[in-house]
Image (cartoon, rainbow, N blue to C red):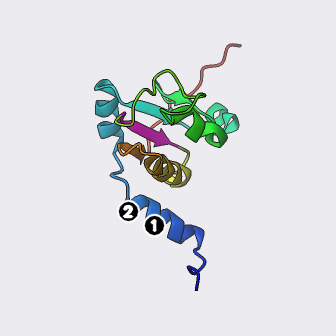
Amino acid sequence: MGEANKSIDDLLDDARRTLQRVTPQDAAAAVARGALLVDTRPVAQRERDGEIPGALIVDRNVLEWRLDPASAHRLPEMHDHDARVIVVCNEGFASSLAAATLQQLGLRNATAAGLPVRARTSSC
């Protein structure tokens, strides 16, 4: 008999059990020590809510290809599975699921955080 269907809440709970989520202050300290901060929010959210200083922008639909050190399409910053990666989204739900998936790829130091944004300045 197969495994029972799970709800999205179940998947999120499972994902968060594998993560050591960080506070904004912890994330800033980790970035200062070389961690990669990855913003997966869609462009419309970044334009509306502002940018996260120092974050790499990686669309959620290509995240695994860009962050897998074994991928031919990886970011130059991703050279080994020990890299500290902190994934950020709008409310912490998608980033938790994404970080758990990155852990399944062997990025054992992947996690999620909620961070403050910096309002975009108008060029007008």
Q: Measuring 45% from the left and 60% from the top, which residue is drawn there?
A: 15
| Residue 34: x %, y % from top left | 33, 25
Q: Residue furthest top?
A: 124
- Up the image or down, 19 lies above or below 2; here it is above
**Label 2, residues with CA under 10 Å away: few <14, some 14-19, many ≥20:** few
Q: Is residue 14 visible?
A: yes
**Label 1, residues with CA under 10 Å away: few <14, some 14-19, many ≥20:** some
| Residue 35: x %, y % from top left | 36, 30
Q: Measuring 56% from the left and 46% from the top, which residue is drawn there?
A: 90
Which quadrant holds residue 24? top left
Q: Residue furthest bottom?
A: 1
Under mark 1, the amino acid is Asp
Left or right placement of residue 105 versus residue 7 in this view = left
For the C terminus, give its image quadrant.
top right
Indicate yes or no whether the magenta region holds residue 37. no
Under mark 2, the amino acid is Arg
Residue designated by label 1:
13
Give the SS element for disc 1: helix
- Up the image or down, 21 lies above or below 57; here it is below
Q: Is residue 40 visible?
A: no
Left or right placement of residue 32 versus residue 11 in this view = left
The number of numbered badges drawn on the structure is 2
Which quadrant holds residue 114? top left
Q: Which mark is residue 31?
A: none
- Up the image or down, 5 lies above or below 37; here it is below
- Up the image or down, 106 lies above or below 120; here it is below
Give the extent of the magenta segment.
83-88
Residue designated by label 2:
17
| Residue 31: x %, y % from top left | 35, 29
For the N terminus, give its image quadrant.
bottom right
Tag 1–tag 2 contact (CB < 8 Å): yes
Q: Main secondary structure of the magenta part?
A: strand
